[in-house]
Image (spheres, rainbow, N blue to C red):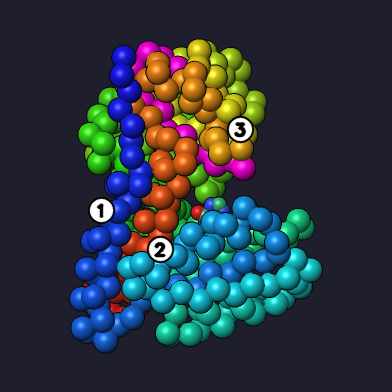
Amino acid sequence: MTAVVLDGKACAAEVEAEVSAQVAELAEAGVHPHLAVVIVGDDPASHIYVSGKERACARVGIRSTRIDLPADTDFSRVVSTVGELNANDDVHGILVQSPLPKGMDELAVTDLIDPAKDVDGFHPSNLGRIVQGRVDGMVPCTPAGIVHLLNWGGVELSGKRAVVIGRSRIVGTPVSLLLARKGVDSTVSVAHSRTADLAGLCRQADILVAAVARPRFVKGDWIKPGAVIVDAGSHPEKCGDVDLDEAAPRSSAYTPVPGGVGPMTISMLIQQTVRAAERTTGID
Ligand code: GUN
């Protein structure tokens, strides 16, 4: 079987073109979308991701401001930084890059971000809307990007059995909710470190989403022939969470690493920054 490559770069380029047009339209109305990115510490991968986000903003005409704080920053300084960004009407979107340094309470920081500016969609009121089946708030970017890419690639989701490996608030949990949502209608299992017979469960999946943050964790013989593979991992070894050399030939379609889910995350971020600008300025 020849597997289709779900080309996240191509799909993201289409989203970028739409966002560029929206940014130009907003400029005519005097609104200039502005994203603030806070990064605490020197995690090398985070710095690479944040640079990618800044470059995407520049490509579509979104202003971005990066606030670099040292790893030994006091929690109170992070709190005051977020408070200032919340109060600044010139800033429409706020993103605090994860992970924060060890010992810093990420959930407490997330709680502080104005939900209307929470372009990551991690605030409890935005995540809560998804639990209610609503996607009219801010939706976490990687999960939104995965569903967008599957739809773009013509992957049938309704009635299909999806297995999501990973239950993080950034990817696993929200993507499982989005896939099970009314209108999308997959039947979703969420697997995690305590799941019994993970390989056996994966072999039942029509759609397999790997979001475990472990390189080449998913093996080729875990793939049901003809399944669709979504690899949300990204590792310095230039691989994802799936051993795609083994797994891709068994699939009907798969997301490559790099060039699959990664570009989609960024395209959803810029899309949501524009949405936040429209809403916080009352243009929407
Ligand atoms: N770290 C890894 N992915 C993400 C993301 O989508 N948003 C933020 N803020 N941090 C991340």
Residue 56 is marked as: 2
- Quote the CA–CA distance across marks 1 and 2: 13 Å
- Residue 27: percent from the left, percent from the top? 26, 81
Above or below residue 157? Residue 267 is below
Q: Which residue is mark 1?
A: 14
Q: Please, what is the dominant secondary structure of the magenta stretch?
A: loop
Q: Residues within 10 Å of mark 3 (few under 14, many from 20)?
A: some
Q: Is residue 91 magenta?
A: no
The quarter holding residue 22 reads bottom left
Q: Is residue 178 left or right of residue 209?
A: left
Q: Which residue is mark 3?
A: 215
* Kind of residue sitting beneath label 3: Pro
Observer-nearest of 114 and 31: 31
Q: Residue at x 23, y 75 (%)?
A: 24
Q: Quadrant of the N terminus?
A: top left
User: Ligand 1 appears in which quadrant?
Assistant: bottom right
Q: Residue at x 48, y 59 (%)?
A: 52
Asked if residue 128 shows in the view, the reply is no
Above or below residue 129? Residue 204 is above
Label 1 lies in ligand 1 vicinity (Cβ under 8 Å):
no
Q: Residue at x 59, y 26 (%)?
A: 217
Q: What secondary structure is found at the residue carrying circle 3?
A: loop
Q: What secondary structure is found at the residue carrying circle 1?
A: helix
Q: Earlier in the sequence, mark 3 or mark 2?
A: 2
Labels 3 and 1 touching (C-beta < 8 A): no
* Kind of residue sitting beneath label 2: Ala
Q: Which residues are magenta?
A: 223-236
Q: Earlier in the sequence, mark 3 or mark 1?
A: 1
Q: Residues within 10 Å of mark 1 (few under 14, many from 20)?
A: few
Q: Residue at x 59, y 41 (%)?
A: 235
